[in-house]
Amino acid sequence: MSRVRRLLLPGLLALVISSCGDSELEYSNHRAYFVYDNSIHLDATLSSAMNPMAPGLFCRISRSTDAYFDFENNQGMKSRVAINAVEKQRTNVLGVYNASGVIVGYGTLDNPPTFYAYDAQCPNCYEESNMPRYQLTMSSDGKASCKNCHRQYDMNNGGIVVSGEGGYKLIRYHASTTGPMGVLSVNN
């Protein structure tokens, strides 16, 4: 029995250690919380990114004032929606320090497409400075770029660095949607 334990124990430990793998690194440990019912607001800019039939469309969600949510997609569409009484009662956290916003959308590489939610700032510049002041710009081909470090990230492919000096991939949050005119949930 002792010999079986000696052989079994290292195998079990290896299995436990390897099961953690990269899945823990897939999502950020930064806090994020945003629940938005688009069936109430019917915002076309946001719904474009919540549509699984339109992969590659991404939408930045930010809150520039206490009264409005701002939406901007990577095709140049923008909108501003007044925050209703129910939404004002929620404690929304849109990105690191609640300052940078989040980007949501379906990637183009998987079938069915994967729904992503990223922080809207450069993770590498943030890591170096600990300041949320490096907001990413989005391009129509699903890339996010930093004007400071000149890195490009592929939002269709898990936010990996595709141009510039290597480094961290985009800060990713857990997210789900019930469809273009449904509920969006981003949380960590």
Image: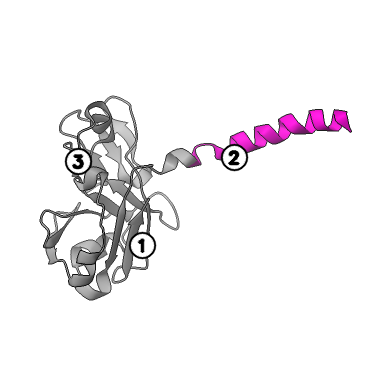
Residue placed furthest toward the right? 1
Residue 5 on the magenta segment: yes
Q: Amino acid at mark 3?
A: Leu
Q: Residues within 10 Å of mark 2 (few under 14, many from 20)?
A: few
Image quarter (top left, top right, bottom left or bottom right) of the N terminus: top right
Residues at marks 3 and 1, CA–CA distance in whole angstroms:
23 Å
Report helix, strand or loop for mark 2.
helix
Residue 74 on the magenta segment: no
- 73 and 171: which is toward the camera: 171
- 164 and 30: which is toward the camera: 30
Q: Which residue is mark 2?
A: 19
Q: Which residue is mark 3?
A: 136
Which is in the foreground here, disc 2 or disc 3? 2
From what the image shows, is residue 11 above or below residue 98?
Answer: above
Q: Which mark is residue 52?
A: 1
Name which residue lies at 26% across and 52% down. 93
- Give the quarter of the image for residue 47: bottom left
Which of the two discs, 2 and 3, labels the residue nearer the N terminus?
Answer: 2
The span picked out in magenta is: 1-23
